[in-house]
Amino acid sequence: MIKINQKIDKPLDHKTECLILPCAEEKKPSGNLKTIDQALNGAITQAFENKRFEGKPNQTLLLNCSGSLKADNLLLIGLGKTKDATAETFCRASATAAKLAESSNFKSASVDMSCLDTITKGKTGLYGELAGAIAEGAGLALYHFDEYKSRDEKDDPPSRVEKLTLLPASKSRTAAVDKSIARAEKIVSAVYSARDLISHPGNTATPTYLANHARKMARKNKITCKVLDKKEMEKLGMGALLGVSRGSHEPPALIVLEYFGTSKKKAPTVIVGKGVTFDTGGISLKPPASMDEMKMDMSGAATTLATLQAVSSLKLPINVIGIVAAAENMPGGSAIKPGDILKSMSGKTIEVLNTDAEGRLVLADALCYAQRYNPKEVIDLATLTGAVLMALGHQAAAVLGNNPAMIARLKEAGDATGERVWELPLWEEYEKATKSEIADLKNIASPGVGAGTIMGAAFLKPFAGEQPWTHIDIAGTAWGFDKPYTTKGPSGYGVRLLIKYLEQHKR
Ligand code: BES
Ligand code: ZN
Ligand code: ZN
């Protein structure tokens, strides 16, 4: 991860390979930009005139300025209209600039933050929030995963930005900026660990690997970690989770993390993650095209583990439990077959009509286990249905649940972080369609019912308990969530959303 620091320095006097200057949308350069424009003999005015740069959102202009400024290069990055500028605006702008700095082979860059002073005037706390967004955006954007690439000694290693310096305009800001940088580093580091876990292929990131990762992470972060193995799950009667893992040689794991940031008497938020480390579909085998992507079917688990990492490193004054249901869905000789009936930990029996609807099976037992904590609320994250891609594409996760206020708060957190959620209804008619002729429930609805994402949530509902519960279907956002601050592949979606959610409602 890049190093982020701060320095009090005037942009004109600051020595750097690349001076990043966030600019609002304007007709011609003003304020700080005007001074720099003069030093550059009107190069910026010219860019405005011929519309090469007008400060439109994420528009960039890279100018070589050696000789005119102390900086070697100037990178203008557009913010759009200042009145619309939010933390997300700065996060995207900073990410865009950081990526361009890296592809231009700069090793370090500095961000002039003088524009923040006008934007945040009279709004306490906003300066720190926007400074944090700048740090977070750059950090998130410069993620790389190259663990499996062997490098030829003769090859040039790829050029990487290693350091980012924030330049607040006055000393009065340094305390706020320090705090924001520290927070951003913790969040970025947690998102990186989620992305790493998802990037690893199925033959590395097995349920056992997830359990070992959780143990190590817990040790570092003063979290308690308990891993239930197959035998312990058998004792608890977790027939649904065990059923899914039966076709695989990889043993399943139920990973439980406990973080207490306040009195243990206070009811915790429980986060439950789907950890199917590879989803072949089982006997209801998936078609070969893009099956490789099903290594990401443990993204809910990755987000759960990373969120606990962030909650603990940020020392949030709340109690949070993370539960990961980890299994591999394979069509081995002992695999469950369409028509098989499983008995879940809750006692409810499930007719498995499609072994590819396995996420709801592993979650059924994990959600039931969550009840042991008498939770204040339960949130589950799962790459549950391909149907969510039909409904929302890669732009938002679907949320469904039993508590409108909770969903409204998640929506708020989603809008603030750019990790958007969108609600789908969970009317009782859908729940009726989960009833089986022969068992209590069936894991897919009859043909013609449609509403794939809703039916997934409707199946989970009876296992989720009476307290507020929200299901987040991240099948469309865990992978291919294309934003300036994401990179190709896994996004780590959900970590920033949940941290924002938990921070806003910590009291
Ligand atoms: N893991 C998949 C869902 C998925 C699809 C995740 C695309 C990421 C991208 C899930 O286990 C699954 O296969 N769901 C089935 C459910 C169906 C059989 C009711 C689906 O969506 O087709
Ligand atoms: Zn599946
Ligand atoms: Zn799956």
Image (cartoon, rainbow, N blue to C red):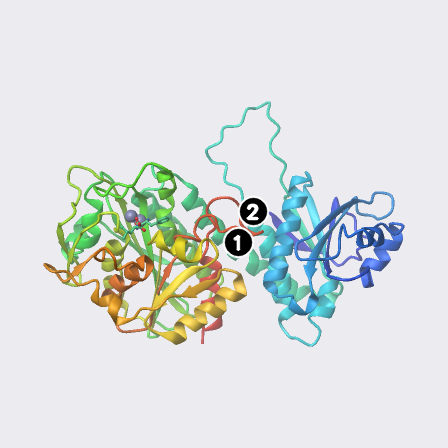
Label 1 packing within 10 angstroms: few (<14), some (14-19), many (20+): many
The answer to whether residue 218 is visible is no
Residue, disc 1: 188
Residue 488 pos. (x, y %): 51, 44
Instruction: Indicate the position of residue 5 as horizontal and vertical percent values.
Output: 66, 54
Mark 2 surroundings within 10 Å by alpha-carbon count, few (fewer than 14), some (14 through 19), many (20 or more) = some
Say which quarter of the image contains residue 119: bottom right
In the rendered image, which quarter contains the C terminus?
A: bottom left
- Secondary structure beneath dot 1 equals helix
Q: Amino acid at mark 2?
A: Met
- Residue where numbered disc 2 is placed: 1
Describe residue 287's horizontal placement relative to residue 389 as left or right. left
Name the residue at the left extreme. 438
Q: CA distance from mark 2 to mark 1?
A: 8 Å
User: Seen from this angle, which residue lies furthest top?
Assistant: 154
Q: Mark 2 vs mark 1: which is more N-terminal?
A: 2
When the figure is inspected, residue 476 is found, relative to residue 158, above or below; the finding is below
Q: Is residue 487 above or below residue 421?
A: above
For the residues labelled 2 and 1, say whether their Cβ atoms are less than 8 Å apart. yes
Question: Foreground: 340 or 124?
Answer: 340
